[in-house]
Image: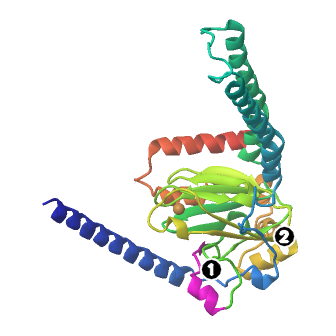
Amino acid sequence: MVESGLSLMTDLEKMTFKRLSLVATLTGVLALALYAVPAFAGAAEGLEIIGQPKNWAYGFQPPASPVKLQMEEFHNHLLVPIITLSSLFVLALLIWVVVRYNRHVNPTPSRTTHNTMLEIVWTVVPVVILVLLVVPSMKLLYTADRTHEAEMTLNIKGYQWYWGYEYPDHGGVNFLANLVSEQDLKKNNDPRPRLLATDNPIVLPVDTNIRLLITAADVLHAFAVPAFGVKLDAVPGHTNETWVRIDKPGTYYGQCSELCGANHGFMPIEVNAVSKERFAQWIHAQGGKMPAEIAAEKAAAAPSVAPGAAAGDTTLEKPKDASEAHPPGTADPTVKEKEAGKSGKKSGAK
Ligand SMILES: [Cu+2]
C-alpha cells in the first residue's frame, strides 16, 4: 500500500513537472517570437566583463557603483574587524578556561554563580557594538534607497521566467530578456558565461543616476546585480525603487534572487554599461529618442505648454507596469492607495 502510494506521488510530480516545463518552453518561444529585437552582445561590443563570479574568488565582485563601494567599505572596515575581534576574544577566553581550569590544574572548582559587574559588562558591551553599527548601517540603507537626482528611469518587470525592461524617458523603448542556452553560446562561439548571458542585455549609460523601478507580473522575483549593490524584490502590483550609478563601462551580470518557480535559476540579468554617446546611439537604433529630443519636439508642437511638462518629466507619471499588473476592475484598492501616496511623496520631494 505504502509503495503504491509513493509511486502514485512520483507520477503526479512527474506530470506536474512535465506540464510546467511545457508551459515554460511555450512562454519562452512566444516571448522570443513576439519581442525579438536586435541583440547587443557585450562581448561583441568589446566590453570588458567586470561583474561576474570567478572561480576561487574571495570577497565581493569589484564594486561598480558608489552604493556598492560604501557597502564594501562597511563590510571590510567595520563588520570584518568587529567579527574578527569578537571571535578572537571568545577563542582566547575558551583557551584560557581549558588551560587554566581543567580537572588536573584546578581539581576543586569554585562554586561562584553570579558576578554582577561581569554580567553588566557582557550585556552592555554587545549593546554598544550594535548601536555603533546602527548608525553607518542606516546611512547605507538610506543611500541605497533612492536618488533624488535621477537623470533617467529604467522600469524592470519580472516574469516567469524572464525579465522585461522599459525606458520611459526614451520614447518607451522596451524589450524582454531571455536566457541564451549553453548550446546556442557554443554554436555561435559566444564567449559570454553560461546561465548569465541574455538575448537582449540591458544597455545603460555610465556616470548617470539611474532610477530603477522594479515590479513583477506574476509571482515574487528579485532583481539583483552584485557589482551594483542592487538586490530588490519584484512584487506583483507594487513598485519598488532603488538606483544605480555605474562607474565604469563593462558588462555586469545578475540573477533573479527570489525563488519564483521551476525556471528561477534561468532568468539572468545582463547589463552593458556604455558611454553616454554610445547609449544615445543604441536608443536611436531601438527606435527611441533621447529626452532632449522629446522635449524639443514637444516644445515645437505646443509652444504654450506648461514648463514642467515640456521638460519631459515622467517622474509623476505612474509607471506603465503598475497599471498593467492591475488592469481596471482587478486592482487592489490598498495597492492603489499606497502608490498614490508614493507618487505624492515624490512630487513633494521635488
Ligand atoms: Cu524570478
Residue 184 lies within the magenta run: yes
> Is residue 250 positioned above or below 128 on the image?
below
Is residue 303 visible to us here? yes
Q: Position of residue 214 (x, y in %)?
A: 61, 56
Instruction: Name the image quarter holding residue 110.
Output: top right
Tag 2–tag 1 contact (CB < 8 Å): no
Q: Quadrant of residue 345?
A: top right
Q: Residue at x 48, y 78 (%)?
A: 28
What's drawn in magenta, residue-wise? 176-188
Residue holding disc 2: 249
Q: Image check: 175 left or right of 347?
A: left
301 with respect to 20 (left or right): right
Q: Which residue is disc 1 drawn over? A: 199
Q: Quadrant of the N terminus?
A: bottom left
- Which residue does the image show at 73% across and 35% down from the upper left? 87
Which residue reaches farthest left? Answer: 1
- Mark 1 lies on a secondary structure that is loop
